[in-house]
Image (tube, coloured by chain):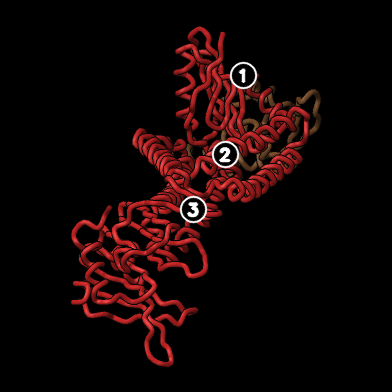
Chain colours: A red, B brown
Amino acid sequence: MKNTKRLMLMNYNYYKEIEKKLELYAKKGLVLEKMGPYFWTFKKTEPQNLKYTVTYFAEGSVFNPHPTDNQQTYFDYAKAAGWDFVCEYNQMQIFCSSLENPPEFETDEKEKLENIHKCMKKSFVISQLLMLLVFALNLFLRLNSLKRNPTDFLSSNIDLAALLMFISIILYSSYTLINYFMWYNKSKKSVDMGGFIIENFSKTRRYFEIGYLIFLFSLIGYMFIHLSTNTAFGIIALSVAQLPLFALVFWGSITLLKRRKFSANANKIISTSLLILTGVLYLGFMFYSIPRFSFSERSNKPYTTVGEYRLYSDKIPLTCEDLYGHIDFEYYSYEADEENTPLLHRNHYSQTSPPMKNAPPELEYSIYEPKFEFVKNIVVSDLTKLNDWSDRKLETLDNAVFSTEKAYAFYYEEANGKLFSGEYILVFTDKIIHIDAETPFTDEQIEIVKSKLLSGNSKV
Amino acid sequence: MPREKYQTLTEQMFYILLCLQSECCGVDIMKMVSEMTEQRVTVGPGTLYTLLDNFVSQGFITLTNIENRKKSYIITDKGREMLRKEYTRLHKLTEDYERFMKKVI
């Protein structure tokens, strides 16, 4: 009969639930053959009444070329009691019995709990702690980036989604660990009083876990969809390919070395080193190929080229021509970018020329529409921040000039007075405009800016 | 492993040590305990493995022979002392029970 694979999203310590599920499957004619991290293989047979038991064995490991001698002794004891070994994964071992009332596999709750705890400390707890560490480090880097460039961060859906993902993984891992230790302590109290190990499974928890997984995968899916519309296909392909590639290298190496009867330690060292090496090589390949094949350049907008410089012709609400009159120059690039996050809507516009002698005036501006007051405060504070490394200073302007709530202009202190750079931060009730022209605006230009950007419809 | 764990013995520990007065392998212990107690006490294979492993590391029993993966054990002086201590404790319990119940009746 044919084999079939089933996705088993079971926590490592849900042994009771696994036993119930396997018994139910056997009744339907699906008998467990092999287990893996997610997909378990079942053999299609006639419906059978089988009893299953899940146990943990400290010496068990995915790197073991074959069951250890001690494991074999364990299997022999099980066999003598009417339990047949089915399969193992890491430290989890599954036995089944066709007897109607097979003897209990574990008859001492205290020893059973201590054995589970010993195995969990070796694998489950360590892996959760490692995951926490890795994601806490990622979260720290993300938060650092948020602190350094809050405006860019808050207007980037990818950055916000990544932040949310890291926080949710950290919270979930912490919850899993806390939950495990609470279960262990409660069970310990219970067995010390002569009672049983506490049932560590509930329907509510299961729904919560499934809900969390759906949330996490939606978030990852959203990030990929967002990336695919904003980034070249090459980067997406490279990013998506890395996970299956790493899994293939790691598990391929483990399987091959097991077949060649390498010891568990040698297998662990070689496979892990190979995984790290693949990671480094892949990173190198990405660094090499992305600039070489222009993967990082967006390719979904029409453009012409001058040398290596790309000229876009997006529509922008305010142009140099609006400000300075007709300019006889055919190599201007007009770019408009929009990013809308649940916190901040940002439109960025620029009119630039390729680097050249006697280049015409350039213009760059962003219009931010914060969706919350605190976001507005963060953006204003970020845009008006003065850097230690620059002698650029900020002057508060009369609000009547641009009809603002607050308005600032940047200047440099020169020997003969203040030299205004043409960069303004204009704060309105519902938006903030950051505009960088090459020279300060004249009264006439201020009116043009107001009519083009503040007339109620600044979008193109 | 905390030492207080073996200040007293569970029934299963008691019978395993009792079986090992003479050299015996794991599978035989399971059968002997069931027979000795007329099925009242059974030692599951998982528990048997863990207890034998712990007893060896505590020095209560020692591994005497390995033949075709079949491991045989025998009780040590330390194990015998532990068993004796447990017997005395249980004996004391029954004595106390009888004395007290006589008074009550």
* Residues at marks 2 and 3 touching, judged by CB atoms closer than 8 Å: no
In the image, what residue type sits under mark 2? Leu
Do marks 1 and 3 both belong to one polypeptide chain?
yes
Q: Quadrant of residue A102?
A: top right
Of all chains, the one bearing label 2 is A
Disc 2: CA contacts within 10 A as few (<14), some (14-19) or many (>=20): few
Q: Amino acid at mark 3?
A: Arg
How far is the residue under mark 2 from the one under mark 1? 36 Å
Residue under pointer 3: A310
The mark closer to the camera, 1 or 3, is 3
Residue B40 placement (x, y as % from top left) = 53, 23
Q: Residue at x 65, y 19 (%)?
A: A80
Residue A205 or residue B83, whichever sits in front? A205
Q: Is residue A337 above or below residue A278?
A: below
The earlier-in-sequence mark between 1 and 3 is 1
Q: Is residue A81 left or right of residue A357?
A: right
Q: Secondary structure at mark 3?
A: strand
**Camera sees residue A175:** no
- Which of A141/A320 is in front? A320
Q: Position of residue A145 (x, y in %)?
A: 46, 62
**Labels 2 and 3 in the same subunit:** yes
Residue A84: assigned label:
1
**Counting residues from the N terminus, which is met first, the one under dot 2 or under dot 3?**
2
Q: Nearer the viewer, residue A328 or B67?
A: A328
Amino acid carrying label 1: it is Asp
Instruction: Classify mark 1: residues with Cα within 10 Å, few (<14), some (14-19) or many (20+).
Output: some
Mark 1 to mark 3: distance in Å? Answer: 69 Å
Q: Is residue A408 left or right of residue A268?
A: left
Residue marked by disc 2: A243
Of the numbered discs 2 and 1, the one sitting upstream in the chain is 1
